[in-house]
Each structure stands twice: as structure tokens, then as C-alpha cells.
Amino acid sequence: MNIYLKYEESSYMPIHSLSVVGDFNGFDATKGVMQKQGNEWLFQTHLTSGQYHYKFLLNDELLLNDPYANMYEIDEKEEIWSMLFINEQQERLYDSTEYSIHIHDYGFTNQVSEKGKTLYKKSIFYGY
């Protein structure tokens, strides 16, 4: 089944590069490069039936879940992943619960906690 993923760019965070990383491409950003069209970034791939985890990699630094995904899963490391489910009939399954999320809903600070200690940095540390 052909899968199309998109990410809308906003003025809150300029994007220089954007990729999809997930178990369907070996978490390899070079295999998930998105193409910019207007203010949208687009990615297309073909997937067979199954369950897939993925995230967006912004500017080669920041991993974000898909704001348009409607299913998420927490992995064994307690990390949240966007999910794609494709059934045996090659249909993408959806959760019909509506919601909205925007990048400006997230707060960024120069104080980052890591393994019980606090680090102070002048730039953002993304911790991955």
C-alpha cells in the first residue's frame, strides 16, 4: 500500500531538512528524505501489512512525532512513537478520535535534565 506522510512548516520553526525515520526504513534518515512543496513536506513509501513506528527528524537534530498521526505507542525504552497500522486487506487503520497539536504548544528551555542531573546549555539539547 502506498503511504503518504506530510508535515506542515510553520513560522515558529524554520525547517532546512526533514526526514522520516522508522522501522520500515531501518531508522535511516537518508531513506526517508521528505520533499518540500509550498509550506508542506511530503514523503511517500510503499508498505505491506503490519505495524510501523516512525518519527520526523527536523534539521538533522530534533525528533518529533507526526502531528497528523492518530495512533501512538510507547516502546520498551518508554519513548513515544507515531504508529501506522496496515491490515491484511492493505487498508490503513485509523483511530477516529479527533485532536489537534501544534509546534507552538511545546515549550523549549535551556535547562535539560539528564539521568538525575541538570545541565545548563546555551543551545537546545535534544537528548537522543
Image (tube, helix red, strand yellow):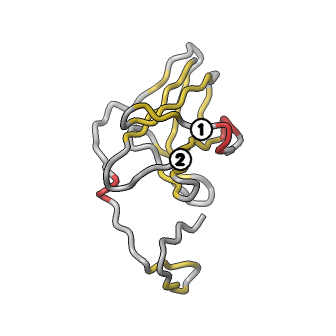
Q: Nearer the viewer, residue 15 or 80?
A: 15
Q: CA distance from mark 2 to mark 1?
A: 8 Å
Q: Is residue 5 above or below residue 56?
A: above
Q: Amino acid at mark 2?
A: Ser
* Residues at circles 2 and 1 in contact by the CB criterion of under 8 Å: yes
User: Which residue is under mark 1?
Assistant: 33
Q: Nearer the viewer, residue 35 or 119?
A: 35
Q: Position of residue 87 (x, y in %)?
A: 55, 21
Residue at the (43%, 31%) spot, across then down: 37
Q: Is residue 86 above or below residue 34?
A: above
Q: Position of residue 90 (x, y in %)?
A: 56, 16
First in sequence: mark 2 or mark 1? Answer: 2
Quadrant in which the C terminus is drawn: bottom right
Residue at the (55%, 50%) spot, across then down: 57
Q: Position of residue 19 (x, y in %)?
A: 56, 43
Q: At numbered mark 2, what does the secondary structure look like: helix, strand or loop?
A: loop
Q: At numbered mark 1, what does the secondary structure look like: helix, strand or loop?
A: loop
Q: Amino acid at mark 1?
A: Val
Q: Is residue 50 above or below residue 15?
A: above
